[in-house]
Image (spheres, rainbow, N blue to C red):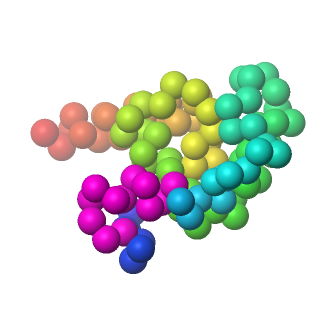
Amino acid sequence: MSTPEYFFDTDLAVHSWREVAACNNRTDVSFFPMPDDLVAINEAKAVCTACPVADECLQFASETNQPDGIWGGMTVKERARIRRKWLEELRQAS
């Protein structure tokens, strides 16, 4: 993933992507829906689809193993699959 030009240094990176995220200050959509609430999950994912920093959000959630919520347009189960693949690639590389 490439780093967007608005990231000026590593200390600001986490805060910068969150400030420009499509979900920032959204109170009409739940980004932490119940796992079986498909309507709420799809509403959150729809916001992520138009988000300019969905990749950064997903990367953050994967690297920090976020246990809940929709991050980067993906559910916990979807992120777990990506995380397993990522960890396997790390193991193979070492």
Expressed as whole percent of the image width and height from the top left, the position of residue 28 reads 82, 45
Image quarter where the C terminus lies is top left
Image quarter where the N terminus lies is bottom left
Q: Residue, x 53% and y 60% (percent of image)? A: 19
Left or right of 29? Residue 75 is left
Number of numbered labels in the structure image? 0
- Between 91 and 25, the residue placed more toward the observer is 25
Confirm whether the magenta stretch covers residue 27: no
Expressed as whole percent of the image width and height from the top left, the position of residue 9 reads 27, 65
Expressed as whole percent of the image width and height from the top left, the position of residue 57 reads 50, 50
Position of residue 59 relative to residue 32, above or below, is: below
Secondary structure, magenta segment, majority class: helix
Q: Residue furthest left?
A: 94
Position of residue 54 relative to residue 2, above or below, is: above
Q: Residue furthest bottom?
A: 5
Quadrant of the image occupied by residue 77: top right
Confirm whether the magenta stretch covers residue 10: yes
Q: Residue, x 56% and y 64% (percent of image)? A: 20
Q: Residue furthest right?
A: 39
Q: Is residue 83 visible?
A: yes
Expressed as whole percent of the image width and height from the top left, the position of residue 31 reads 69, 38
Position of residue 62 relative to residue 3, above or below, is: above
- Between 49 and 32, the residue placed more toward the observer is 32
Left or right of 13? Residue 23 is right
Q: Residue, x 43% and y 48% (percent of image)? A: 59
Q: Residue, x 36% and y 69% (percent of image)? A: 7
Start-end of magenta stretch: 7-18
Position of residue 61 relative to residue 72, above or below, is: above
Q: Is residue 85 visible?
A: no
Left or right of 67? Residue 60 is left
